[in-house]
Image (spheres, helix red, strand yellow):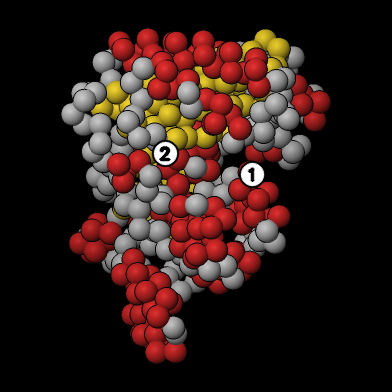
Amino acid sequence: MQSDEQSLQGELIVKDRASVTVERSYTIESKRKIIHIDMDAFFASVEQRDNLQYRGKPLIVGGQPHSRGVVAACSYEAREFGIHSAMPSSQAYRQCPQAIFVPPRFNAYRDASHLIQAIFRRYTDKVEPLSLDEAYLDVTDRARTDQRFGGSAQRIANEIRQAIFDELNLTASAGVSYNKFLAKLASDRNKPNGICVIKPGEAEVLLARLPVRKFHGVGQATERKMNKLGITTGQDLKNWSQLALVDAFGKQGLYYFNIVRGIDHRPVNNNRERKSIGAERTFQNDLQNTHEMLAALELICETLIERMKAKNTFAKTLTLKLRYANFEVVTRSISPDGGLSDKQSITRLLPGLLTKTEAGDRAVRLLGLSVAHLQPDVSKTATMDADNASSATPSHSDASIDIQAVDDLYTSQLKLL
Ligand SMILES: [Mg+2]
C-alpha cells in the first residue's frame, strides 16, 4: 500500500487540479478494508444441501414450469443451460425440461441467513446486509488490531468463507477491496466458492477494461443510454468530464464519474433502515396502455394511503415500481417539495413518473408504489433532511433496482406461486 501512495504522490505533480482532488480522495479511501460476501446460488444451494436427491442436478427454485412464476434461484448445473434468476419458469422449462422445479422455502433461507450473519459479526459489527445472501463488512479495525490477520482483510474473508462452509455446509464468494463498489465487483469475479482482491492501484486499470453493465449502479436502462452516447467500457466512461456526465445523467453522473475511478465513499451502514411502506399488484392480463395503468395505480395508491395512515406516517420519497411483460423490473423515484401525506399528493406525481418508463410502449404485468424516508410527524419534520433524499449515491436509481429486484423475488414469488 505504501508504494501505491508514494507513486500517487509522484503522479500528483503532473496532473491538473481536477485530477489532484480525485487522487487525494483515492489515497485516503484506500485505507479502508471492505469485504463483500455473496452466497453462491443461495436458495438452490440450501435445497441441494438439505435434499440429497437434488445434488449434481439442474435445480430451479421458484415458480412451477407452467405457471406465471419466475426463477428465484437456480443451481450451477441449471446455469449451464442458460437459466438465470428472474427468468420466467416457463422459459427455463423450455431450455431444460429435465430440471427439477421446487417451490422456495423462505424460512429455511432466512434461518441460514441469520446463522451466516452471526458468523460475520464475529469479525466486525459493521455489517450491512443487502439481502438474505449478501452483505458488506467493514473489517478495517479488525484487520489492523488482530495480529492473527496481520492487516489482511483477505485472510479474514477466507476465514469467514471457511466458517460458513464448516458450520452451514454452504459456499460463499468474497470480494475484498477498499470500498463497497469495488468489493461487490470483486465478489463476482471468481464465483462460485472464490475470492478476489482488488488492491488500490489495480482498480482503475481493471475498471477501464470492463463493460459498463458490470458496474453496480448501471442497470439496463442506463446501459442502453450510455451505449447510445458511445459509452460501452469503463475507459469510454472515463473520457467524459464530470460536467458532461452530470448533464447527461443528473446527480447519478457524479456517481459514475467517481466509480470508474474506483472512488466510493459510502460507509458500511450497519443500522441501515430499509423502512418503506408499499403496495403492489400483479395483473392477470398484462396492461397495455397508460390509462389502464394510471387507473390501476390509483387503486394501489388507496391501499398505500391506508397503510400509511395505519402507521401514522408522512413520507418524503415516492417510488413507482413496474415489471414489464418480460419480467424486467424498473423503479422511478421522486422526492417532491412538501412531501407525501395524502392521496392527492401522490396521485398528481404518477403521470410524470410513468412517462419516465417505457410503459405504454411495453406491456406491464406488475405495478407497485412505495414511500420511503418516513417521518412520524407531518408538519414539523417536513423540510428536514432534504439533502439525504437526493444524495449522489445510487440509492434511488439503478442500484436500488438490483436490490429491489432481489426483494421482489422474495415477496412476489409468494404471490406468483
Ligand atoms: Mg448470491
What is the C-alpha distance between the residues marked 1 and 2? 20 Å
* Label 1 lies in ligand 1 vicinity (Cβ under 8 Å): no
Closer to the camera, 268 or 36? 268
What x and y, as percent, mark residue 304? 42, 15
Relative vertical location of residue 352 with respect to residue 142 in this rendering, above or below: above
Q: Residue at x 52, y 21 (%)?
A: 368
- Residue 324, image x and y in percent? 67, 27
Percent from the top left, x then y, of residue 347?
47, 20
Which residue is depicted at the point 70% across and 61% down? Answer: 230
The kind of secondary structure element at disc 2 is strand
Give 199 or 319, whichever is nearer the viewer. 319
Give me the residue at 44% from left, 35% from top. 334
Q: Is residue 64 above or below residue 1?
A: above
Other-residue count near label 2 (Cα within 10 Å), few / some / many at <14 / 14–19 / ≥20: some
Residue 265 lies left or right of residue 259; in this view the side is left
Identify the residue under disc 1. Answer: 220
The tag on residue 371 is none
Can residue 198 be spotted in the picture?
A: no
Q: Quadrant of the C terminus?
A: top right
Which element is circle 1 on? helix
Q: Residues within 10 Å of mark 1 (few under 14, many from 20)?
A: some
**Residue type, label 1:** Gln
Circle nearer the N terminus (1, 2): 2
Task: Please identify the quadrant where the N terminus is shown.
Answer: bottom left
Compared to 66, does 334 lie above or below?
A: below
Q: Amino acid at mark 2?
A: Leu
Name the residue carrying label 2: 130
Residue at the location (66% across, 61% down)? 231
Residue 374, given in percent of the width and then of the height, sits at 30, 28
- Tell me if I can see residue 362 in this picture: yes
Viewer-nearest of discs 1 and 2:
1
